[in-house]
Every structure is written in C-alpha cells, then in structure tokens.
Amino acid sequence: MSYGFYLKHRTNIPYGLASKAKQFPHGSIQFSMSRHKTRGCNPPHHHDFFHFYYLRQGPSMHFFNGADYVLNSGSMVTVPPMVEHFCDSTCFSGSVECINLFFTEEFLKESLPDKKKDALFNMLYLEPVFSNYDKHMPVLCFTGTSKNVLEEIIEKIYGDFIKKDIFMIDHIRVNMIKLLTKIADKYNETTTNEKEEIFTQYRLALQSALNYVDENYMHKIYIKDVCKIALMSPSRFSYIFKQITGKTFIEYLMYLRTLHACNLLISTDKTVYDVGITCGFNSDIYFGRVFKSLTGYQPSDYRKKSTSGQGDGSFGGQGDGSFVLGLSKLQKPQPFIAQD
C-alpha cells in the first residue's frame, strides 16, 4: 500500500468545510516539525502529507475524521494524507506541550534503491498508519519505557531539524524509520490486546455457533441462522469469527466438511458423489474443487492412495486454493474457543 494507492482507492475523502493544503508548506525538503507549549485551536483541515501529533504534556482534544479523542501525555495521533482533523487544547487548563511532525512519503523513501524495497517499506512502516485510519484507531498511547524511548527518538529528530546542517536530512530519515518502527510495534500490540478483548467478550457466543455448525455441517447452513444463535448481525459475526479463528466462516465450513469427507473416503465404500452430498457439498464438481484446494488431491486420488497404502497419512500434493492442509492437520478441529 502506498500514498498513491491510498488516495486512489479512498472514496470517502472528507472535504466538507475543511481547508486543504495543496502543497507541502514547509519547504523543499518535505519535512518539518513544530513544538507548542501554549494552548490553542486550529481549524478543521486536511492535506496531502502525513501529520504525526505527539502530546508530551496534556491533556488535549483531537478531532479525527468526525470523531473526537481525549489525549493525555504519551498520546500519538497518526494522521494519513487527506483525513480531516484538528486539535483543540483550549478546553482544558494547565500546562501543555505538543510536537508536530509533517512529512511526505517521498521524503522517507527517496533513498530507497528499487521498487521491491519500496513495497517492503510500505508494508513495514506505512501500512500500520493507514490501518489505524481504517480501524478507527488513530491514537496510540505510549507509557513507561516505550514512552521514554519514543520521546528520545522525537528529540533527536527535533535536534537535527533545528540544527539544519549538511547531515540533517540523512539523520532525520534514519530516526524517522526508528519512530515508524515504534509506532508499528505499538499498533501490533494494541491490535493483539483488542483481539484478546474480543475473544473474552464473544467466547461463549462463538462456541454456540461453532457447536451448531459442527452438528449441522451436512445440511445447507445459512449464515443468518448461525448469526441468530450467536446473537450478532452478519457483519459483526463475520468480523468476530475471523478475528478469533483466523478463518472466514465459509473457510471453516469447507474445512470441516472436507475433514469428514476424508474420513468417509477412507472408512466407507460410498461413491465420491455420495460422500460429497453426505458432507454438505451440493455437487461432485464443487466437492472436488474444494477438496483439492485444501488437500492437493482429487477425492478419488486421495482414496486410492490411502487404501493402497501409498499414503503416509498426510497430503503431499499442492492445492491451488487459498491454503493447503496436510492430513495430519486435517484432523477433527479442536474448538477454537477455550473452555473454562
């Protein structure tokens, strides 16, 4: 994902009444910083470059894409290009200190030698910033040692910026990579914690849904019926299911049906067609396609290898689906939800 890709595929760019900076306003190097120790409020705006807002001492308020966030010391707001935002620290009293970093994607990536490294850079450093916007998580909160390390990096960047010597740009780029690394680490930590909270909150509901699927995989299953059991909307259920299990609902259902088909192919003399129908597949063509995508074999080939003793209990073929499972992995699925 890159800035150009990001702008091309965003369909909800919030112009509204916000002002827009059409060009980078801080000089030819496409990087700038500012530090403020007085309270104030700037108007809603958006621009073509990144803006990182760090609150060293607070509190303050930040409005981001239509939502408001109360910030405290250690809060970092990562604002991608073209997202409406503004800061207002006048609604609080006491001392305040905020640090702003403004930069373009080109400033960070100008020294990259080729496109492969450019793509890697996007994935490692810029995608978490975009993901913060997509997941409505623009604010990351640093505390303790991580806060001290972050502020040390920011101070080094600020020191190089005000020094303005011949090494300024190179030094800033190096430390900006360190800063982006800390932000990416914090983002990953935050999303992991969110997943654990989701797991705890929806554990029983998902277990009930999975029990229903395990008992009815051989029948036609409608996601709306599963959602009723889980007491969730279809969109919410799909999101929670993927977060907790790592699979989409359809992926899990196909996995479960293929598991039982493997057992029937080995232990019965049912035809391939009958095995597929028994396990919930509505046609032998569809059954064969799903089976091969998961195992690497057509059902008939799998039966031959298993019954002739050629197989060793595992799938050696490579399927053309989204993932490939060996028979050793394609055992009865353990419940994805931990039990008390």
Image: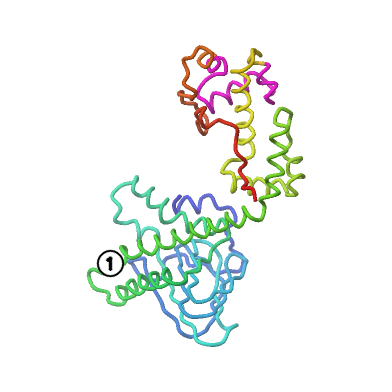
Q: Which residues are magenta?
A: 274-303
Residue at image x 73%, y 41%?
226
| Disc 1 crowd, CA 10 A, few/some/many (<14, 14-19, 20+) | some
Left or right position of 65 against 210: left
Given residues 62 and 330, the one toward you in this image is 330
Tell me the quarter of the picture where residue 268 sits. Answer: top right
Given residues 108 and 212, the one toward you in this image is 212
Tell me the quarter of the picture where residue 300 sits. Answer: top right
Q: Does 117 appear in magenta? A: no
**Residue 340 % position (x, y):** 65, 51
- Decide: is 87 above or below 283: below
Main secondary structure along the magenta-highlighted residues: helix
Under mark 1, the amino acid is: His
**Residue 311 % position (x, y):** 48, 18
**Tag 1 secondary structure:** helix
- Decide: is 67 above or below 227: below
Residue at image x 27%, y 74%?
164
Residue found farthest to the bottom: 94
Q: Which residue is mark 1?
A: 171
Left or right position of 94 against 106: right
**Residue 152 % position (x, y):** 35, 73
Residue found farthest to the left: 166
Given residues 102 and 59, the one toward you in this image is 59
Residue at image x 44%, y 52%?
2
- Decide: is 9 above or below 41: above
Residue at image x 38%, y 64%?
179
**Residue 103 % position (x, y):** 40, 65
Tell me the quarter of the picture where residue 136 sits. Answer: bottom right
